[in-house]
Amino acid sequence: MVVTKPQPDEEDIADLGEARPSPTTRLEGWRRFVEEDLASFDLLPEPQWHSLNPTGREAYDEARIRYHSELQVVRTSAVKEIAHQVRLLTLLNQREHGARRGMIVSGEQTTGKTTALKQLGRLHELRIRQRYPGGNRIPVVYLTAPPKGSPRKLAMEFARFLGLPAVGPRHNTIDITSAVCQVMIEARTDLVLVDEIHLMNHATLVGEDLSDHLKYFTEHLPATFVYAGIDVEQSGVFTGVRGKQLGGRCVLVRTGPFPLGPEWRSLVASLEATLRLQQHEQGTLVKHSDYLHQRTGGVIGSLSHLIRAAAISAILDNSERITRATLKSTRIDHNSESAAQPASLRRASQ
């Protein structure tokens, strides 16, 4: 929920327990994600903030905590490159009747792959809605590759996203697949996003079966397929004949840690600009860019976690600002913490 009222009152507290939204791997949840406005919040002027009664202060703080708990999307160079490449592919595939070209987004964990995938899907759907207002189109389908997947499990992921009626044991894989393809063709789906593609290992029989079924979808649907996964090049996705075939049809874009430089500092500045703390001095985090890079290894997911968690801590302890001490006391993921730890301490802990 995005709060836009600058002055909360007691009635706002009733809104704090709103129901959790459907996941984006379901059509209802995906549409809500597409239609949501970007998170926004206006700070109260100092005199008005100080004059809040305890109930009003509680509502105001809870609203700001919700605001900071949302992932603030920043258009990095990687996100722009991915969006540009997908735009090109969808245009190239418009008149293609054979094997359509796709894209694979590969990178380490928490380097922005899923965020980029969802954002390009959101941009594409908004573009289609603007061009073709009304109607019952489903321009984008988003799903994750099922763990220990099988063709039936994959077909079921498509069916669940589309909200097809419950499928029973009497429905075989071909029945489900045919129903899914028919609905997607009628709904004019032209972009399919498949996350966690690293689970499809072509070095295994299960991975081969899953790949063959995914290939069936790509050949029977007039859509561009975009995949994302962790270090896809080393996961077995490009192994064997099927892997080479997939690699021959897909553009590969890598995401990774940011080097310490102008783009990193710009990224820190963009995230700092989203803070809604009463006493925070803008530019403080930018001054600590080197330290933030050391703490997070240049990984955008870890940086976002660190800044948002520090902001929520500053609200909870009433300090209303993020300092170097706040950052140092804020814990983040184990990988980043281990990498940031001095070598001597790492050896001592082993």
Image: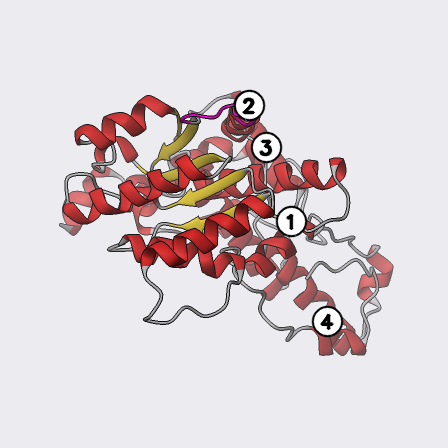
Dot 4: element: helix
Name the N-terminal-most of marks 3 and 1. 1
Separation (CA) of disc 3 from disc 2? 30 Å
Dot 2: element: loop
At horizontal 33% and vertical 70% (from top left) the residue drawn is 170
Q: In which quarter of the image is residue 122?
A: top right
Separation (CA) of disc 4 from disc 1? 27 Å
Indicate which label's residue lies in the foreground, 4 or 3. 3
Name the N-terminal-most of marks 4 and 2. 4
Indicate which label's residue lies in the foreground, 3 or 2. 2
Residue behind mark 1: 34
Q: Do the residues labelled 4 and 3 touch (CB within 8 Å)?
A: no
Residue behind mark 4: 59
Q: Is residue 10 left or right of residue 112?
A: right
Q: Position of residue 298 (x, y in %)?
A: 42, 33
Q: Which amino acid does label 2 sit on?
A: Arg
Separation (CA) of disc 4 from disc 3? 31 Å
Residue behind mark 2: 95
